[in-house]
Image (cartoon, helix red, strand yellow):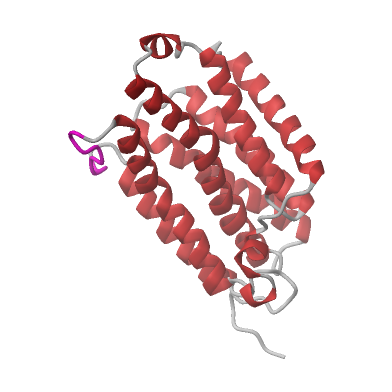
Amino acid sequence: MTTTPGENPGSSPFHRPTAAIGIAAAAYLVTVVVTWPGLRVPVAVPGFPGWLNILGEAIVTLAPLVVGAMLAAWVGGRTADGGMSRVLGIRFRPVDLLTGALVALVARAVVEVATPTVGSLRPVLDDGSPETNAALAASIVVLVLAAPFAEEVFFRGAVQRSLQTLLVGPLAPRVAAVLAVAVTTLAFVLLHAVPYGAEVPLSVLLAPLLVGIGAGTLAVVTGRIGAGIVAHVLFNLSGVLLLLG
């Protein structure tokens, strides 16, 4: 039996990993463009509530990642065997809560030792106006729920799983897994650094580095991204709670 280069006829959910990676790369570049300083298109609409503008900006930023992951799964994955959720590894088990929480706790502890969280959201809360509270609530929902889910589905679900499938042929499975985690984490870190231009704070590099390694390792060990989503959500939530404390 002959195979086309870049295709994997085995049991992996990605049978065309090269195509999946190409689509993911295009989605990644779109996200870089819409978040690049000086290039990003203003989303805020004068006269619209602040919370609505915040949600609009989140959609513009996260939509390319979600659409890219879905297209990568559809074109390069075996969707007929269980749908996009199976291809992208979107599954949860009770143990994911424990392992995800552990990774989040360790990552947050390291970040706080290296670059302690400063500032407070108390002045915003003390404002007390309905519009301010709604904007704060929208920001928290995006940071704690929407962004972690979209980023994990794209990076650990589409990019890492397809890249690991592509590498497992020429490389030993363990080496392929480590390299896939490393490359995906690097891309994850760089995307978070883009909006800061040339002056990127250490915390902006360290936080996604730790979350990327932790979530990526969990995806390799468990074969799903549920624990990574939990870790990402709880890590971001802990940062919010520190600012509210």
Q: Is residue 35 left or right of residue 93?
A: left
Residue at (48%, 55%) from the top-left corner?
Answer: 66
Q: Quadrant of residue 164?
A: bottom right
How many numbered callouts?
Answer: 0
Q: Is residue 105 left or right of residue 7?
A: right
Location of residue 137 with respect to 114 vertically, above or below: below
Magenta region, main secondary structure: loop
Q: Is residue 71 left or right of residue 79?
A: left
Is residue 15 inside the magenta stretch? no
Location of residue 39 with respect to 123 vertically, above or below: below
Choose between 119 and 19: the one closer to the eye: 119
Location of residue 3 with respect to 118 vertically, above or below: below
Residue at (59%, 78%) from the top-left corner?
Answer: 5
Q: Quadrant of the N terminus?
A: bottom right
Q: Position of residue 209 (x, y in %)?
A: 58, 35
Residue at (67%, 58%) from the top-left corner?
Answer: 89
Q: Position of residue 180 (x, y in %)?
A: 64, 53
Query: Residue pushed farthest right?
Result: 95
Query: Residue pushed farthest bottom?
Result: 1
Query: Residue pushed farthest front?
Result: 130
Q: Position of residue 25 (x, y in %)?
A: 45, 59
Residue at (31%, 41%) from the top-left corner?
Answer: 36
Q: Quadrant of the C terminus?
A: top right
Location of residue 223 with respect to 191 vertically, above or below: below
Q: Quadrant of residue 67?
A: bottom left
Q: Which residues are magenta?
A: 39-47
Q: Position of residue 128 (x, y in %)?
A: 38, 13
Q: Quadrant of residue 232?
A: top right
